[in-house]
Each structure stands twice: as C-alpha cells, then as structure tokens.
Image (spheres, helix red, strand yellow):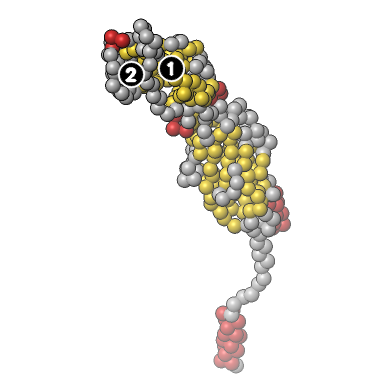
Amino acid sequence: MKKSTLLIALVVLSVAAFQASFAQITDQTATITVGAVQKLNVTGSPSLTIGDAQVTAGTDLLASVTSPEACAYSITHNSATAKKITASIPAVLAVGKLEVKLGTGSYVDISNATTAVDVKTGIAKGALTEAIVYQLSGIKASDGVINDSKLVTFTITN
Amino acid sequence: MKKLTVLTAILALSLFAFQSAFSQSANQTVTIEVQPVSKISVSGPVSLVINDAVPGQDPLPVSSSATSYNITHNSSTAGKISASINSALPAGIKLEITMAPVLGTSAGKQDISSATTAVDVVTGIGLGKGSNQTITYDFSATLAAGVFASTVKTVNFTVTN
C-alpha cells in the first residue's frame, strides 16, 4: 500500500510537470500608429551680389543669381494629401525683385511676400531634396549701393 | 493603474498627431549686396581729317559728334569722367573734346592734345545711367605744324568717384 501510494504521487507530479513544460498562452493587443509626419529643412547661406561684372555701361544693374549648388531644401512627408511649400520674408524688399525657385520649378517673386506665397505645390508623399535658387533683379543704378539681408521662411503645409 | 497608462499613451499619440498636422517651417538668410558700380563705354572709332583752308588763314578745323558714350553710376559719392591720350600731339596740332553732361556737369571743351595725364571732362556725376551721350571732337592745326600724317591716338576715358 505504501509503495502504491508513492507511485501514484509520482505519476501525479509527473503529469503536473509535463503540463507545465508546455507554453503558456495569453493575448495582448498592440496598437501601432504612424502619425502624420512633415519635415522641412534648408541648407546654405545664399548671397546675391551685383558688381561691375553684372553691369553694362548705360544700363541699369543686371540680375544676380545664386548657383544651384549653393543651397537646397529637403522635405519628408507621409500624408496622402499633397503638400506645398510657402515662402515669406519679414519685410518688403525696398528696391528690386527677389525671386526664389525650388527645384525645376519657376521663379516666384517673394519681394513683397510678408504674407506667405506658394513656391512649390503638389508635393506627393515621400522624401525629396532639391536646389533652391535665388535671383535678384530690377535694381536701378539710381538705387545706389545696397547691403541688406532677408530672412526667408519656408513652410510646409497642406 | 493600467487604464491610466493606456490613457496617457493615447493622449500622447493624439498630441503628436495634432502637432504634426500643423505646418513646419525652416528659415534661410539671404544676403543681398549691390556694390559701387561705375562703368563707361564709348561707341566706335572716330576719324578727323583736315584738308581745307581759307586762303591766308590756318587750315580749317574739323569737328565730329559721331560718337557717344554710355555710363552707369550707382555710388552716392559723385563721380567724374576724365580723359587722357596715350601720347602728346606735336606743337600746332590740337585735339579737343566735349562730353555731354548726362549725369553731371560738363567741363566744356577740354584740350587733350597733351593730356597724357587725365583731365576732367564731366564732373559731379550722380546716381543713374545714361546712354548715347554725345562726344564731340574738335581737331585743328596751325600752318606751322605742316602736314601731319595719319596717326592713331587712343583716348582713354575713366569714370571714378
């Protein structure tokens, strides 16, 4: 009787150990979200200079253009809605015309853009890096010597 | 405690999405410079020939207003145009020049026959531009100077502040 009791106890313990060796299963809900991402940055320190080389005697001052290598912008967004980039300056340009061109687009006049103007539209989701080219023109000889700087604010928006 | 954690996570995600929905900006400073510019150019060459005289007098002088100059000047400092000749003419041969005063004051007719050092022909040039402004040459010779074979002279115009 004592032996049989011991045997039974061993069997019970073995079964318990066997069951415990199986994986224990439980469920967990993982909620994952990719939020709307839109990032924009610009590089370069553009400088537009008009000097003797840009002038023909008897005419007003010719345009100055930054090189395409001088500055660039990079944009990343993941929205199904196409984005656009706007540009603005804090104060109207006193004389002449300041234009900006993003990538292969056209020049956009930002001389009076204290309210932002569209400089690139229809940007589909993805990542993009393109050149920023500035052009200064419309300066007259009678405008005299100029030393100025403008803070151009680019904004990515819907 | 578990509910509070979930609530906090949801709130954080919502805030992130909310912020992302706003526009994002980047700034760039554009430097603009227009340097002092003083430029002058002249139209083609001029030819002056003396070949006549009134009997009993020196040869008849000749004049030409066939050429012109263009100028651009943007410095607040008044500019001037000066003229010089590459080598002096011999005695009795006189070459004079008068320039129209588009942006300043003409110095009138100036003798440049010996002006290997520049002489002022227009002064007080202000900001602006001018094109096709007349240059008048007056060429004269005395009988004593005799025949003067065809000679090319270079007249140099300089605009300075």
Tag count in the figure? 2
Residue B33 point in image, percent of width and height: 50, 29
Q: Position of residue B119 (x, y in %)?
A: 37, 13
Q: Name the residue tied to disc 2.
A: B85
**Residue B122 falls in image quadrant:** top left
Say if labels 2 and 1 share a chain.
yes
The amino acid type, in three-letter code, at marker 1 is: Ser
Under mark 2, the amino acid is: Ile
Question: Looking at the image, which residue is at 65% across and 33% down?
Answer: A112
Residue B14 is at least partly visible in this image? yes
Asked if residue A29 lies left or right of residue B66, the reply is: right
Which callout, 2 or 1, points to the residue nearer the camera?
Answer: 1
Disc 1: which residue? B63
Labels 2 and 1: the sequence-earlier one: 1
How far separated are the C-alphas under marks 2 and 1? 18 Å
Identify the residue at horizontal 47%, vertical 27% (top origin). Answer: A57
The x and y percentages for residue B76 are 50, 17
- Please say if B103 is above or below A102: above
Is residue A36 in view?
Answer: no
Residue at disc 2, secondary structure: strand
